[in-house]
Amino acid sequence: MTSPVAIQFVPADTGPLATHTGRIALLSGPEVKGAIPRALSRLTKGAVDRALASPAFAKLKPGEGMELAWPTGLAAEALHLVKLAPKAESAAARKAGATIGAKLGDGDMLVLAPGISGAHEVAFGLALRAYRFAERKSEAAKPYGAVQMMVAEPEAVAAKAGPMAAVAEGVFFTRDLVSEPSNILTTHDFAARLAAMQELGLDVEILEEDDLEKLGMRTLLAVGMGSDCPSKVVVMRWNGGGDEAPLALVGKGVCFDSGGISLKPAAGMEDMTMDMGGAAVVAGVMRTLALRKSKSNVVGLVGLVENMPSGRAQRPGDVVTSMKGDTIQVTNTDAEGRLVLADVLWYAQERFKPSGIIDLATLTGAVIIALGHENTGVFSNHDAFCNEFLKAARHEGEGAWRLPLGEAYDAKLKSDIADIRNSTGARDAGSIVAACFLQRFVKPDMPWIHLDIAGTALTKSETAFAPKGATGWGVRAINRLIAARES
């Protein structure tokens, strides 16, 4: 997998400033204060003073930067001046780190942050932004250069940065999974990558089609009937919290979604390699928990299928019976993710009796129409649980917006020949109706959150902490929610 760039924390020292040959980043306010900035200013014959006092620097927002190429008096190819107050809030510190991370190349980077109290947050932002998926390139990408960060107390900063490095690795694991093409990341390969996390201390169990048939997961199995890739459910358990009931994370893992018999248009279908984004986030969270040795009990369950058209595929109009026992009329085979989640949600409750459930899925295009690519659609039956998550998402800067549920929306699922139908065929309230479908497979007293990440799992342009492509949205917020419960 893609590994986050390693960051070494070292004491502040003016010695290397003149001879460093890669790039240098200075975190500073508009005034030159401290031995490091003053030494830089002397070496550059006042260029640093003039740049920090310039109108261009004044216009920068906290965390943004400007570049001086081939600065006089330095061997460095560039000097980045990043605007950041010594006691800046974590959001600004992470943004400053991301600004630096976006400039990493194969040369070494020296980050000067001796007076920054949130240097560990800067390092986290840097690590998150310095990502590239190059596994399928014929020529190996040059690795990023070494990163050294000069700080006042290296050991203390490193201790704070350690758990954040675990989160970054979980985010990268998620991004890699979402970025992989479907001929590589088959249901077999996905399950194998999850099984390999047993080395980290996770308990991983793979349920094959025979197991799923015995359990009655007929709606999940129906989605994968048209594919040569067998459907699977992977269960990952982290038991760090004693005897407490686990939090359950449930992810949609459609490794490729052609739409089935209700075939999608050709334009853009190549993006449907990311339709396993919900399962990828669950996997990334579980990896993070194992790496940071979380003191919580969490079970992650992912339904892995491929939705393909063939002579064996389910047809529009078919009626299938869920593990719960409800019958479902399949009016659109492209509304398949909710069929996968229905059985896995019920199984999670029946087997693990969780304290709450969060499910994640690239479920509807309608949520993109509603919220764009800036916010995930959030649905919940439990205000306190939902607010707890939204607080975590705000702290992590991961956009999330709560949308309603209600009987009027649920009534749209009525079928003439079965208990419910999987799709209304209408354009109105598509993401809400899909959430109402899922709610039918959540027991009334079970705290539950549904996250529709169709717009946030993968983007066509860069975001604050990721280049264009897979974002890893949700790993940070869910990990923070879990960590807050540990304290």
Image (cartoon, rainbow, N blue to C red):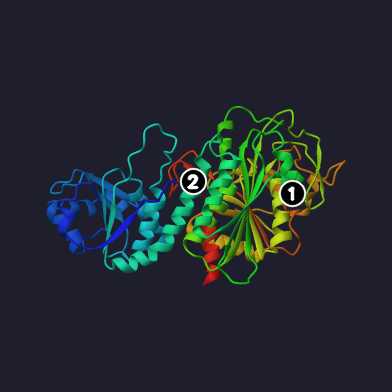
Q: Secondary structure at mark 2?
A: helix
State the image quarter where residue 260 is shown.
Answer: top right
Q: Which residue is disc 2 drawn over?
A: 175
Q: Up-down: is 423 above or below 248?
A: above
Q: Residue at x 57, y 60 (%)?
A: 390
Residue 450: x %, y % from top left: 65, 54
**Is residue 192 at least partly visible in the picture?**
yes
Mark 1, secondary structure of its residue: helix
Q: Residues within 10 Å of mark 2 (few under 14, many from 20)?
A: many
Q: Amino acid at mark 1?
A: Phe
**Label 1: few (<14), some (14–19) or many (≥20) C-alpha neighbours in 10 Å:** many
* In-image side of 238 versus 261 (left or right): left
Q: Is there CB contact under 8 Å for labels 2 and 1?
A: no
Is 213 in front, or is 222?
A: 213
Q: Position of residue 330 (x, y in %)?
A: 78, 39
Q: Picture coordinates of residue 342 (x, y %)? A: 72, 50
User: Is 12 left, or right, of 102 in this rendering?
Assistant: left
Residue with the mark numbered 1: 437
